[in-house]
Image (tube, coloured by chain):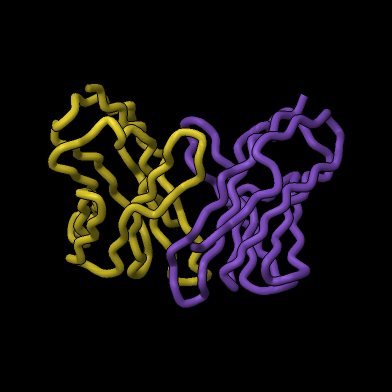
Amino acid sequence: GDSVTQMEGPVTLSEEAFLTINCTYTATGYPSLFWYVQYPGEGLQLLLKATKADDKGSNKGFEATYRKETTSFHLEKGSVQVSDSAVYFCALSDQGFQKLVFGTGTRLLVSP
Amino acid sequence: DVKVTQSSRYLVKRTGEKVFLECVQDMDHENMFWYRQDPGLGLRLIYFSYDVKMKEKGDIPEGYSVSREKKERFSLILESASTNQTSMYLCASSLWQNTEAFFGQGTRLTVV
């Protein structure tokens, strides 16, 4: 079945460092791809999405490009802030009932 | 502002009790979902519903049931709670034509 693999955490960075969190997927058909973020004590919020190959999703300085040839959707940010500390989940939605399949999550810790 | 509301943030129940987790959305969404979140395992789908009175099993339905009598409300039922059901439970909803999911804040359930 469909699956999402993302890098293990935690990822520990200093403020203003460059961030990459890797995400690869396995799916039949042409899924939509998402990054969700979970801040401490909260539910998940959509960060960005891409619905077809070569689309770039972006929000709050974060970007990810839907790469069909490498089945990847890596999350990047040029300069992280302490407030970006959270758990990041990569996900895909199948084209049937639109249920989301999640990766295991990557915790990001940003220090001043 | 879109809203998914879960009835409790924290619950403590005894082994063998019947437990109800309630979720309400105010966005007139067709789809609703129940996930559980465990460290190292990410989010796993328990059940979902794409219409009133309709339900589909997710990846880990054993020990759970659901009810959707009204479009805005989706209940998760633990028929006889066990300690291995101690977890964070997240409810989500999405439009039929839009795969973005909106999440509640989660219910942390402890079964003792």
Which lettered chain is shown in purple? B
Q: Colour of chain A?
A: yellow
Q: Is residue A16 left or right of residue B5?
A: left
Q: Where does the C terminus of chain B fall, quadrant-wise?
A: top right
- Residue at image point 34% right, 52% down: A47
Query: Could you say where residue B38 lies in the image, as x and y percent from the top left?
Result: 54, 34
Q: Is residue A68 left or right of residue B2?
A: left
Most extreme residue toward the right, as rendered?
Answer: B17
Relative depth, front residue between A87 and A27: A87
Relative depth, front residue between B75 and A14: A14
Occupied quadrant, residue B92: bottom right
- Residue at image point 22% right, 22% down: A112
- Residue at image point 19% right, 24% down: A14
Residue B28 to residue B111: above or below: below
Q: Is residue B48 left or right of residue B53?
A: left
Residue B59 to residue B68: above or below: above
Query: Could you say where residue B102 lies in the image, as x and y percent from the top left?
Result: 50, 58
Most extreme residue toward the bottom, as rendered?
Answer: B97
Query: Could you say where residue B5 lies in the image, as x and y percent from the top left?
Result: 62, 53
Query: Could you say where residue B60 lies in the image, as x and y percent from the top left?
Result: 63, 47
Q: Is residue B98 left or right of residue B12?
A: left
Most extreme residue toward the front, as rendered?
Answer: B1
- Residue at image point 27% right, 30% down: A82
Q: How many marks?
A: 0
